[in-house]
Amino acid sequence: MGYRIRERREELQMTQEQLAEKSKVSRQTISAIETGKADNVLVSTLAAIAVALDTTVDKIFYPECPND
């Protein structure tokens, strides 16, 4: 999951700091998620990151799934 967040962030040419500001999630948390060091990430955190990345939580977990 974390690498998908990083891929999407980089696709948008966004830094971790910019994502943190836009999502209201700390840069440290974003870094931990992207590197797989975060345990028990809240759904609300993932949702905030997804919105900031103009995507959905579903697409973060299942990038190949079709839109409903």
Image: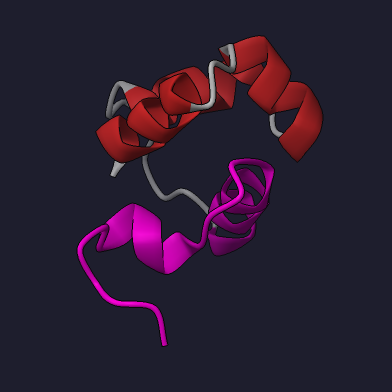
Check residue 45 for magenta coloring.
yes
Can you give x and y, in whole percent of width and height, for residue 5 in the image? 40, 36
Residue 48 percent coordinates (x, y): 67, 50
Quarter of the N terminus within the rendering: top left
The residue under the point 51% across, 62% down is 56
Residue 9 screen position, x and y as percent: 49, 27
* 40 within the magenta span: no
Q: Nearer the viewer, residue 37 or 62?
A: 62
**Left or right, 22 with reference to 67:** right
| Side of 3 relative to 17 (left or right) | left
Q: Quadrant of the C terminus?
A: bottom left
Closer-to-camera residue (11/41): 11
Image: 13 above or below 53: above
Total labels: the figure holds: 0
Stretch of the chain drawn in magenta: 43-68
The residue at the point 41 percent across, 50 percent down is 40
